[in-house]
Image: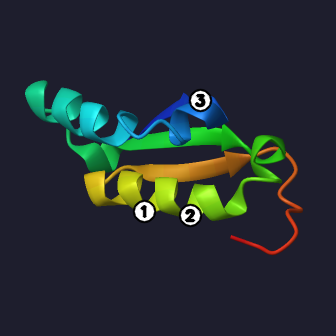
Amino acid sequence: MRLYIPIAVATLFDQSFAPWLAAELGGHGVPSSTLVLEFDAEGIRSELARLRGAMESLQRVGVRLAMCGNADVEGGL
């Protein structure tokens, strides 16, 4: 089973989010692989370089990411 949670794009860029999330998941015994964070494609159009770093941090935690909305983003991910 996976739990999909929508989050604001600004949350992806918060440097304290990934460590906080890892601690919360671990503290509650929730496997990080069950969590999928959804974010809106429209909110990242001008932030692709920053998004890569944010995605890498969250992937190290072990969560999955899902982009919703208009996925026609120039330059790709």
Give the crowd class for mark 2: few <14, some 14-19, many >=20 residues within 10 Å.
few
- According to the picture, the residue beneath numbered tag 2 turns out to be 52
Which kind of residue does numbered mark 2 sit on? Answer: Arg
Q: Going by the picture, which residue comes out furthest to the bottom? A: 75
Say above or below: 7 vs 15: above
Closer mark to the observer between disc 3 and disc 2: 2
Dot 1 falls on a residue whose secondary structure is helix
Which kind of residue does numbered mark 1 sit on? Answer: Glu
**Residue 59 coordinates in the image, percent (x, y):** 37, 58
Give the crowd class for mark 3: few <14, some 14-19, many >=20 residues within 10 Å.
some
**Residue 31 coordinates in the image, percent (x, y):** 20, 43
Q: In this view, does 55 lie to the left or right of 42?
A: left
- According to the picture, the residue beneath numbered tag 1 turns out to be 56
Q: Distance between the residues labelled 3 and 1?
A: 18 Å
Specify the label residue 6 is tagged with. 3
| Picture quadrant of residue 75 | bottom right
Instruction: Give the residue drawn at x 21%, y 27%.
Output: 24
Dot 3 falls on a residue whose secondary structure is strand
45 or 4: nearer the viewer = 45
Q: Which of marks 3 and 2 is nearer the N terminus?
A: 3
Closer mark to the observer between disc 3 and disc 1: 1
Say above or below: 47 vs 14: below
| Picture quadrant of residue 49 | bottom right
Q: Which of marks 3 and 1 is nearer the N terminus?
A: 3
Which kind of residue does numbered mark 3 sit on? Answer: Pro
Say above or below: 19 vs 51: above
Disc 1 and disc 2 in contact, CB within 8 angstroms: yes
Q: How far apart are marks 3 and 2 (CA)?
A: 18 Å
46 or 41: nearer the viewer = 46
Q: Distance between the residues labelled 1 and 2?
A: 6 Å
Instruction: Give the residue drawn at x 78%, y 41%.
Output: 43
User: Which colour scheme appears in the figure?
Assistant: rainbow
